[in-house]
Image (cartoon, rainbow, N blue to C red):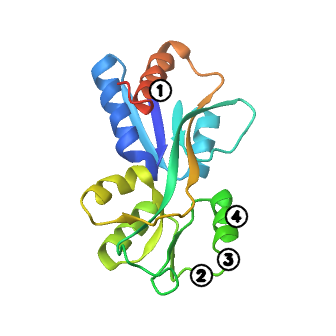
Amino acid sequence: MLTVGSELTLAQPLLLDWVRWIRQSIPDIALRVHVDVPRDLIDQVASGMVDAAIMYAPQHRPGLEIDLLMEEKLVLATSDPAMDLKKTSYVHTDWGPDFALHRDMNFPDVEPDLSFDFGPLALSYVLASGGYGYFRMSAVKPHLAAGQLHLVPGMPQYSYPVYMVRSANADDGVLGPALAGLRAISEGNA
């Protein structure tokens, strides 16, 4: 049995694509998929309850191997292409301490009207109610193509890396092929 996990915000599409790949490419492996909050997920990988997890900012611990999978970008997007930063509702998403530091340096006078700790919910709010905020480019792309959102020109973009975390003691015979598939998916080669 292979148990794979993901932070909630990564559950789609990366985790879903990975699970589909495993089912098609390694059908003889029983699979358990687990989605959880980062702190609990890292505990489960460290304890061996979860074999591998996809995470944004994993806590480094002895006995864990952490590898960069891909770099996401956080971009400033708005529902109104003619918006005024000072007059439009800023919807803040807690993307972690690094993002908060950079955002505060670049926008010291912008106070959020509303704060979320879950990016997909913040994005849904902006789509339904208007405003602007920082979101993952992969989540924004379909809304840009549909004309529902617009990138704010000249605004900084921030790196938001995605990592694969596994126990250093994991069984490579089972986990190795699954991780190779995850790498291929994250690089767009699967």
Q: CA distance from mark 2 to mark 3?
A: 8 Å
Q: Residues within 10 Å of mark 3 (few under 14, many from 20)?
A: few
The 10 Å Cα crowd at callout 1, few under 14, some 14 to 19, many 20 or more, is some
Q: Is residue 1 visible?
A: no
> At 36% from the left edge and 46% from the top edge, which residue is drawn?
12
Q: Amino acid at mark 2?
A: Glu
Residue tagged 3: 108
Total marks drawn? Answer: 4
Residue that carries the numbered disc 2 in the rendered image: 111
Q: Can you give x and y, in whole percent of width and height, for residue 7 in the image?
A: 49, 48
Q: In this orientation, does residue 3 appear?
A: yes
The residue carrying mark 1 is 183
Question: How far apart, in angstroms, are the residues tagged by discs 2 and 1?
Answer: 38 Å
Residue at 67% x, 70% y: name it.
104
Residue at position x 63%, y 44% in the image: 58
> Depth-wise, is mark 1 or mark 3 nearer the camera?
3
